[in-house]
Image: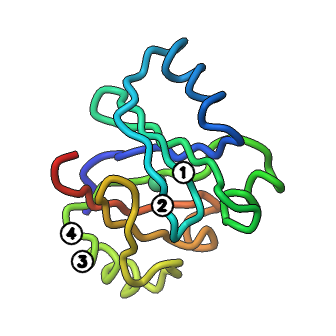
Amino acid sequence: MLTKINHIGIAVSSLSESLAFYETHLGMALTGIEEVAEQGVRVAMLQVGQSKIELLEPTSPDSPVAKFLDKNGPGIHHLAYEVADIEDAIARLVADGLRMIDTVPRNGAHGARIAFVHPRSSGGVLTELCQAGGGY
Ligand code: CO
C-alpha cells in the first residue's frame, strides 16, 4: 500500500528563518513555496534525495499548525507516506477500523492529494497518506 516516505512535515514559526538552516547550512534544494489556504499554512518543500522536508508556517492564529506551535513549539509535525491510490488506502484503513481525520482526500501542496490518519489510531504520530500530484 505504501511506496516510500514522501516527506516529513515540520512546524516552524517563520519560513524565512528556517530556510536559512535547511537551505544554506544543510544544502537542501528548495523546490517551491505555496500557500494552502484551506489548511491555513504556507508550505516550503525541500528535496532530500527521493524524499522531502515540508516546512509549515501558519498564516492565521487559529490554523491547526498555529495551535500545534502554541502547544509544542517548533518541531516535527507529521510523517507522510506515499501511496499509489489514496482512495484505496483510505478504504482499507477504514475497513480495518482505524479512525481517519480525512475519509475524503483533500488538496495538499504541489497538487498532491492527502488524508490524515487520526493520532489515536496511529500511536500518537500524525500520519499523512499522500498521493503525489503530476509533475512534482
Ligand atoms: Co504533509
Marks 3/4 in contact by CB < 8 Å: the verdict is yes
Looking at the picture, which amino acid does disc 2 mark? Answer: Val
Q: Report how far apart the C-alphas of labels 3 and 1 lie in the structure.
A: 28 Å
Query: Which residue is painted at 43% across and 53% down in the image?
Result: 80
Q: Is residue 117 left or right of residue 50?
A: right
Mark 1 residue's CB less than 8 Å from ligand 1: no
In which quadrant will I find the C terminus?
Answer: top left
In which quadrant will I find the N terminus?
Answer: bottom left
Dot 1 crowding, Cα within 10 Å, few <14, some 14–19, many 20+: some
Marks 1/2 in contact by CB < 8 Å: the verdict is yes
Residue 39 picture quarter: bottom right
Mark 4 residue's CB less than 8 Å from ligand 1: no
Residue 20 location in percent, x, y? 59, 20
Q: Which residue is mark 2?
A: 36
Q: Which residue is mark 1?
A: 42
Residue 77 location in percent, x, y? 61, 50
